[in-house]
Amino acid sequence: MITVRTDSIFYWLCLICAALAGLLMLGFFVQLSLSSAATWREFGLGFLFSRDWDPVANHFGALPSIVGTLCTTVIALLIAIPLAFAAALFLVDAPPLIAGVLSHAIDLLAAIPSVIYGMWGLFVLAPIMQAHVQPFMVDVLRLHQLPLLGRYVGEYYNGFGILTAGLILAIMVLPYICAILRDVIRMTPPMLREAAYGIGCTRWETAKDIVLRYGIRGVLGGIFIGLGRALGETMAVLFVIGNLMDMPEDIFSGATTIAATLANNFAEADGLQRSALFALGLVLLLMSFAIQVAAQYYLHATSARRGESRS
Amino acid sequence: MKSKRSITTRKWTDRLVRAFSALAVALAVLTMLWIIGTVIAYGHHALRPSFLINPSRPYGIANGGIANALLGTIAITFGAAAIAVPPALLGGIYLSEYKDNRAITSVLRFSATVMMGMPSVIIGLFVYMIMVVPSGHFSGLAGSVALAIIMYPVIMRSTEDMLGMVPYTLRESALALGMTRTRTTLRIISFAARKGLLTGVLLALARVSGETAPLLFTALFADSWPTNYFGGPTANMPVLITEYATNSPFAEMHQAGWGAALVVMMLVLTINIATRLLFRGQNDGH
């Protein structure tokens, strides 16, 4: 009798502990919704599309933060995805010892605390951007005079802003995307790759036409994981984005992201502004949640197979 | 359909891509070394004994250090581990060992995985509302709770993975000997997977010990020794680095910030690399 009771107590204890994960997730939504209620009542959905952020007039809008978040994330992914895919191709085909060492070295990028990325960005990367990279883009390449893309590049620069933040984010998300892509490439049945080599495909053709197509869901999952990381990153962005509550004009302009706005303004805020910050938090939560759900949807099939291959 | 590309073009494209692949790896690894190298180059000047044993002091007062922040970070991180590890292990046991209700298990596994990807700044906001506002003050404990929430799903999922690797025959043998489920799980299965469980916990610990954003909303910072862990702002390394690097124009403070960054980085990387080396083969690489 006693043993049966311990067993059922232990079962319920485990169940409650596991359920805590779900409850916390629910708690985030409930708490942020409650705390931001005043903002939604005051501005409605217009909050999402308003450009103003004026604590004096008590008028708040989320658009600059949302646009800044999306711009930095897009730049980060544009840089990180090709690099991660190329690096993963190299690591899968390299001799095991070299591949192991290099994979761990890339994984270390994910272990470095984000505040150190921020400091490195502030004291090392931003000055280099200002002194070398941005002058090169403007004065030598004359990117701002390009017919269509030119207006997004801009002529004035100071080292900080969206491009610098996007670059740092790219370095930060690279190891996450690369790790998943490595798994995806390894999962392709050897038979498929061998068949492709057999009919005379080069390695690159095999990679793009066979491996990429076979593992496309895993690749998408990996991209979504990277997207989620870039979207919510706070400290590294906070140090280099410039923290301007304005709509960004181009990729050199100072801007802000949702996470950076939260970290930067929360201490001084009260009343409606604090509620507006919680509303921004809710927006970020919803975006992250949607992205994680998408990532899990795409990775689900692959993870089941990965589990098999591991055991 | 694409057709009639000459063999030369195809071969050269292939070479080009392979060169780009090698370049991508080199770029990633070199950037990693560049960042670590920068922190060491700027930070090692600051590492004098007095820097490590004196508490932090406002600008202008000589012989400031980081000892209080270091102690505070250790208190906050171990506090987080004390809060998160036992229930997270039990939660992982549920996901791995009790498969009687697939719907519940998959919903909970799903929420844990989604929670792993939640921005840490959101968790900071959440803990601010549930702990700092009701109690009326920032505290080290609130910082611990925030870090515990970040660790929770990570440990839960790693526990599940590690227990899942224990051969099923071990469970059957134990049960056949007449052990209860509880005893089987705790004494046989968890014992068999102990290295993996420890790896998961240590990696989670390394991950949160450099976490900054949630601490800005919870533990904040103080120039005093972390004696007021339960009742007031508590010094910690990540916020000290942020303060010194961004809110101070003085080279001396930047120097101290680099020193603190070096200490944090060493701490995190040592735990990380040591764990991976000690328990090689037990974890899945990321």
Image (cartoon, coloured by chain):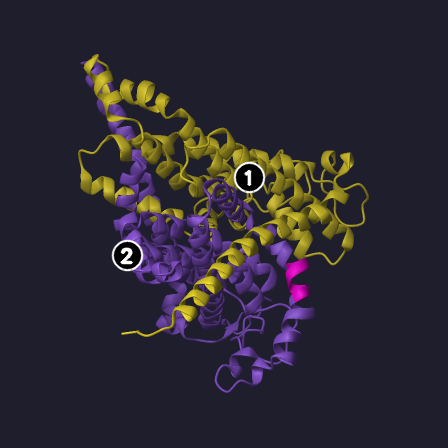
Chain colours: A purple, B yellow
Q: Is residue A266 left or right of residue B57?
A: left
Is A187 within the magenta?
Answer: no
Residue A10, how many percent across, how many down?
Answer: 27, 25
* Residue marked by disc 2: A214
Q: In terms of image quadrants, where is residue A290?
A: bottom left
- Measured as percent of width and height from the top left, residue A16 is found at 29, 34
Q: Does B104 sit left or right of A121 as displayed?
A: left
User: Label 1: few (<14), some or many (≥20) within 10 Å?
Assistant: many
Q: Quick one: B249 or B31, which is closer to the camera?
A: B31
Q: Chain of mark 1?
A: B
* Mark 1 lies on residue: B140
In the rendered image, the quadrant that contains the C terminus of chain A is: top left
Q: Is residue A180 left or right of residue B255?
A: left
Pair 2/1: label in front: 2
- Which image quadrant for residue B183? top left
Chain bearing mark 2: A
When the figure is inspected, residue A76 is found, relative to residue B224, above or below; the finding is below
Helix, strand or loop for disc 1? helix
